[in-house]
Amino acid sequence: MSSTFYRSFVALISGGIFAVGLGVSGMLNPANVRGFLDILGEWKPALMFVMVGAIAVYAISNLLAQRMQKPVLEKDWSNLPRPGFDFPNVAKLGAVLFGVGWGMAGFCPGPAIVSLPSLNPSVIIFTIAMLAGFYGFALYERMKHNKAH
């Protein structure tokens, strides 16, 4: 079997584990997400514990990856840019809209996609808006790149 099959299989299994984790942690319930953001009301810390768990998984995975000569399913490590704090990007309208939408809807991309089979109208509307935002950002970046050249 090809390496593409193995990468796709690992992605499918990883996505499935992520979806189950979202369900078990209650993050598919928008009330839990909104409850986390309601720091002046009935604050619900569940999302904080999910984030701490995700950070722990990432930290362990990152430490293991640093000790590896090469990735398991790729020929070499990708050359992704190092993340950093870039205030102009944080202040962009898209980031603000994403945060407001996340707070109002109680969904972020992962839980929204996992919740799509429920056919809940609010999930569908959020996902359409999210995809429109993704497309709009990609279009903006393409136009910016074309203008620079």
Image (spheres, rainbow, N blue to C red):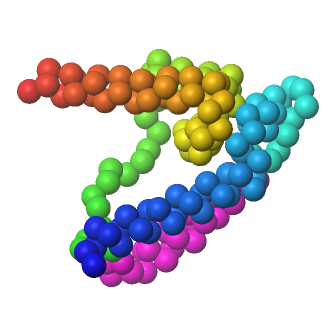
- Can I make out residue 55 in this image? no
Report x, y in % for residue 51: 68, 51
Q: Residue at x 89, y 26 (%)?
A: 41
Q: Main secondary structure of the magenta part?
A: helix
Which picture quadrant has residue 37? top right
Residue 61 is left or right of residue 70, and the answer is right
Q: Is residue 39 above or below residue 92?
A: below
Report x, y in % for residue 67: 43, 80
Report x, y in % for residue 117: 60, 41
Q: Is residue 19 above or below residue 124?
A: below
Quadrant where the image shows the N terminus: bottom left
Q: Is residue 11 above or below residue 129?
A: below
The magenta stretch is: 49-72
Q: Residue at x 41, y 68 (%)?
A: 9
Q: Nearer the viewer, residue 113 or 75?
A: 113
Report x, y in % for residue 107: 64, 34
Residue 104 belongs to magenta span? no
Q: Residue at x 64, y 24 (%)?
A: 122
Quadrant where the image shows the C terminus: top left
Which picture quadrant has residue 135? top left
Residue 35 is left or right of residue 125, and the answer is right
Residue 12 is left or right of residue 148, and the answer is right
Which picture quadrant has residue 43? top right
Q: Nearer the viewer, residue 6 or 137?
A: 6
- Can I make out residue 14 in this image? yes
Q: Is residue 74 above or below residue 128?
A: below
Q: Residue at x 42, y 24 (%)?
A: 132
Q: Residue furthest right?
A: 42
Q: Residue furthest left?
A: 149
Total labels: the figure holds 0
